[in-house]
Image (cartoon, rainbow, N blue to C red):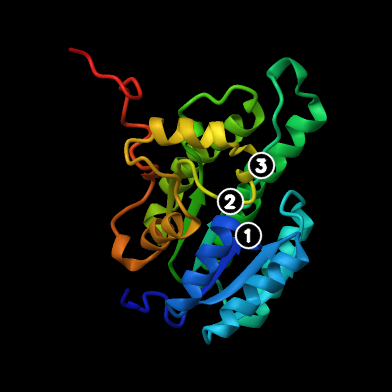
Amino acid sequence: MNNPQRFLGKTAVVTGSGSGIGRATAIRLAWEGARVGLVDRDPLGLADAQTEIERQGGESVVALADVSQPDQVQGAFDAIKQSLGVPQVLVNNAGILRIASIEDTSDELFDLVLRTNLFSVFYFSKVFARSLLSAGISGSIVNVSSIHAVLSEPNGGAYTAAKGGIEAMSRTMASEWARRGIRVNCVRPGATHTALSEPLYTDEVVAALRLRVPMGTIAEPEQIAAGICFLASEEANYSTGTTLDIDGGYIMDGSLPGLTYT
């Protein structure tokens, strides 16, 4: 794969970059020339991602933060900006999943998931946009949603609410900032091998997914990162307010797995 260096000279911030899609995205951004601010609450994951970026000759700084807390978001962003310059790319990827039926979802659990998955997008995007507008430069936000923003996920009500909210809020952000030089888009991953999903991927679930997904496979984080980096780059400079499905055809296919009408 050729290295297009689409982010040479730019600073990027990736939340949830200690593992999974966030880690893969941060590493790819650095490989393409970006200076990367790594944000996570897992110090070991951050150290591992930074080591890999340094191994390939990239530059990064680590910001340990709980993205559900606005003061920690501001502190992480300020530290990255001071070290690497004004960020021009923001990838809001941080997220958690808690399994519970609606009737068994406590207020505390719902609040935890919404604050981590949705409020964090609001906090980081606002800080990022204010920084860009103050500096008079353009930038790009990519928010990581999920196919479960549009497909129900039994026992995942808080998670689906957050992902649906991310997409709705992203469209509003895109509308408000389109004429001010800030693009906002979403990526909507399907089934992907990550630390978040692996505990759920029993042999039975994997077999069912391979039947359900038209392409017959589960994605690797690097496949999602490729789409994120495209939307973040100038190659997508006429795209805003859109959502890119990277799901092996999961959403578009309404057929019965293994069966056809005759």
On the image, the x and y values in percent for residue 240 come to 36, 51
On the image, the x and y values in percent for residue 53 come to 57, 78
On screen, residue 126 versus residue 144, left or right, reads right
Under mark 1, the amino acid is Ser
Task: For mark 1, give the secondary structure.
Answer: loop
On the image, the x and y values in percent for residue 45 come to 70, 65
Task: For mark 3, give the secondary structure.
Answer: helix
Residue bearing the label numbered 3:
199
Residue bearing the label numbered 1:
19
Q: Nearer the viewer, mark 1 or mark 3?
A: 3
Quick one: quadrant of the N terminus?
A: bottom left
On the image, the x and y values in percent for residue 86 come to 56, 75
On screen, residue 75 versus residue 138, left or right, reads right
Marks 2 and 1, the one that precedes in the sequence: 1
Residue bearing the label numbered 2:
194
Using the image, determine if residue 226 lies above or below residue 169: below
Distance between the alpha carbons at the discs numbered 1 and 3: 14 Å
Residue 79 occupies quadrant: bottom right
Using the image, determine if residue 154 lies above or below residue 91: above
Q: Is residue 165 visible?
A: no
Query: Crowding at label 1, few (<14), some or many (≥20) Cα neighbours within 10 Å?
Result: many
Marks 3 and 2, the one that precedes in the sequence: 2
Residue at (44%, 54%) from the top-left corner?
224
* The disc label shown at residue 255, or none: none
Residue at (66%, 74%) from the top-left corner?
80
